[in-house]
Image (tube, rainbow, N blue to C red):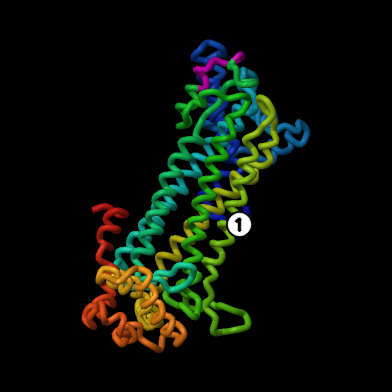
Amino acid sequence: MVPRYARPAMTAIWEPESRFRIWFEIEAHATDALAELGVVPKDAARALWDWWATSPAIDVPAIDAIEAVTKHDVIAFLTWVAENVGDQARFMHQGMTSSDVLDTCLAVQLARASDILIEDLDKLLEVLKRRAWEHKLTPTIGRSHGIHAEPVTFGLKLAQAYAEFARNRERLIAARADIATCAISGAVGTFANIDPRVEEHVAEKLGLSVEPTSTQVIPRDRHAMFFATLGVIASSIERLATEIRHLQRTEVLEAEEYFSPGQKGSSAMPHKRNPVLTENLTGLARMVRGYVTPALENVALWHERDISHSSVERYIGPDATITLDFALARLTGVMDKLVIYPERMQKNLDKMGGLVHSQRVLLALTQAGVSREDSYRLVQRNAMKVWESDGQLSLMELLKADPEVTAALSAEEIEDRFDLGYHFKNVDTIFARVFGA
């Protein structure tokens, strides 16, 4: 975790004290259930909660000092609790194994992280929707292969982004449900030394589902899907960031990141206004995607359990969620303050002498009885003259001067095919599909 790219609420989930608090809750709730089943004295469960209610902050250095001797984090924690609670602590962890604590804790942490990420997505969606409606009918050029294609609106670009992030929100909700499972099933997952009802109780108390069948660990396909979902969200961030970076290029300059008073773009060139935030987002997206492959490789563990996944998850759990949280918040800020230049969009639309209307002329010729092959040839030969003139010539005027074209289309029919508004007749339909009626 790099502090530069971290926000407090998400970081707090992964702090050692937060982890130990979750561990205690797992152990105490399990002891409650064992007490109800008559396996341990009810006084033992009460003693844990009584101490917890009056105890000071968790002494992380003390636990770390014990672990330095035991070389086992869960045993170190249990030892520290026992030193503070006293004799009744011996009934804690009855029939449980370390993975019951570690995996259930990780499920709680990832579920809480998901809640923050879902909130992040909601804020981003709100901004994208507002900006999309603001520029619903702002004409701009659509590009394929980076080359002018046909007119679109800037609102449509943002509506596409909204729809993509709405899908990501649905994916994350599903991934949260998939990851939020509890396993309190003991060594190799057979419940030989602990009643399945203990697992059900702990799951209910922590807001988790029961893992239908664990080995000694929760199956890592769940985690793989979770981190893969984060990777998809990161890719969507990069897609929108890349669009903004292109639009801010000097040759395009249809939109740019907000440049605040006193901001500097370059240590050498005072004129520079660089897309530093979206470039940063592109890099952060690469990092989040980088955690997907290790999560996939964690699925194949040996037999009922090994710990090859453990060191991986100590990295990717905090780093992926903290980084994605920061990236979503940064993207929301970029889109909220994005400076948009409709006049430059119109200028770029008009730059190539009307070439963007070539398909409409092609279709008109075919509907007038000219073969598609000849229609394409007639439009293309005039379009290439405009292209080679760098837009100094007008496609409309060249077509009106071409006798083969005017043999099929009148000047008025040609002019009609250069109506910009024609391309936007279904914008309302698309917006209704994306945002609802």
Magenta includes 194? Answer: yes
Left or right: where does residue 193 sit relative to residue 129? right
Residue placed farthest to the top in the image? Answer: 38
Is residue 226 at all visible to an observer of this figure? yes
Q: Is residue 262 above or below residue 164?
A: below
Q: Secondary structure at mark 1?
A: helix
From the viewer's side, name the closer residue of 402 and 309: 402
> Residue at point 55% right, 20% down?
31
* Relative image position of residue 215 (x, y in whole percent): 61, 24
Examine the rendered structure and indicate whether residue 421 appears above or below residue 302: below
Query: On the rendered structure, is 189 left or right of 235?
Result: right
Residue 182 image position (x, y, % from top left):
52, 28
Where does label 1 land, which residue?
Answer: 3
**What amino acid does circle 1 point to?**
Pro
Q: Is residue 127 visible?
A: no
x%, y% of residue 17? 60, 41
Residue 396 picture location, percent across and down: 31, 83
Q: Is residue 178 magenta?
A: no
Q: Nearer the viewer, residue 339 or 26?
A: 339
Q: Residue at x 21, y 81 (%)?
A: 412
Task: Give whichever of 368, 204 is nearer the camera.
Answer: 368
Q: Residue furthest right?
A: 69
Q: Residue at x 37, y 60 (%)?
A: 128
How packed is label 1: few (under 14 Cα within 10 Å), some, or many (20 or more)? few
Tell me the magenta residue range. 192-199
